[in-house]
Image (spheres, rainbow, N blue to C red):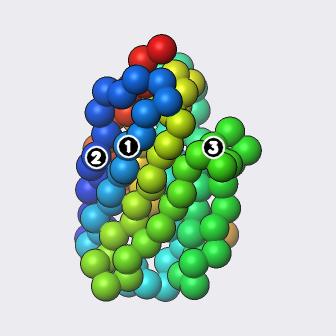
Amino acid sequence: QVQLVESGGGLVQAGGSLRLSCATSGIVFSINVMGWYRQAPGKQRELVAYITRIGTTFYANSVKGRFTISRDNSENTVYLQMRSLKPEDTAVYYCNRAGGAGPFEGSWGQGTQVTVSS
């Protein structure tokens, strides 16, 4: 059973920073491409960043240079360091598998709310 538990969100002023964590279980974490997604009110869920099993990273243009994704295969955890936050970063953030295999459908966690005030 796949479990994805996100944490670390909160309310922050524009320009601030947050670090999100996602603890996983029920998967062979080390072989999976892992990603962070976000969904803002009234919008579709979008992929923000992903990291391959060997550490290659990808970022959406909207967060490039501000967000950093990382992983700890020994802890089955993926992180998202967010800096220079903007109000448009406000969303619920989720982690899940990324890349060609796509997310583990039916296994989305509860997400963690990030709210950036102007």
Residue at 36% across / 28% down in the picture? Answer: 12
How far across and down, in percent of the image, does residue 46 sit? Answer: 59, 42
Callout 2 touching callout 1 (CB < 8 Å): yes
Q: Position of residue 28 (x, y in %)?
A: 38, 83
Earlier residue among tags 2 and 1: 2
Q: Describe residue 110's horizontal placement relative to residue 82 as left or right.
A: left
- Where does the image place residue 35, in percent across and percent down from the top left? 52, 60
The answer to whether residue 82 shows anywhere in this view is: yes
Callout 1 secondary element = strand
- Left or right for 42, reference 61: left
Residue 112: percent from left, percent from top: 32, 41
Q: Label 2 neighbourhood size at 10 Å, few (<14), some (14-19), many (20+)?
A: some
How busy is the neighbourhood of tag 1: few (under 14 within 10 Å), some, or many (20 plus)? some
Q: Which kind of residue does numbered mark 3 sit on?
A: Val
Disc 3 on helix, strand or loop? loop
The residue that disc 2 covers is 8
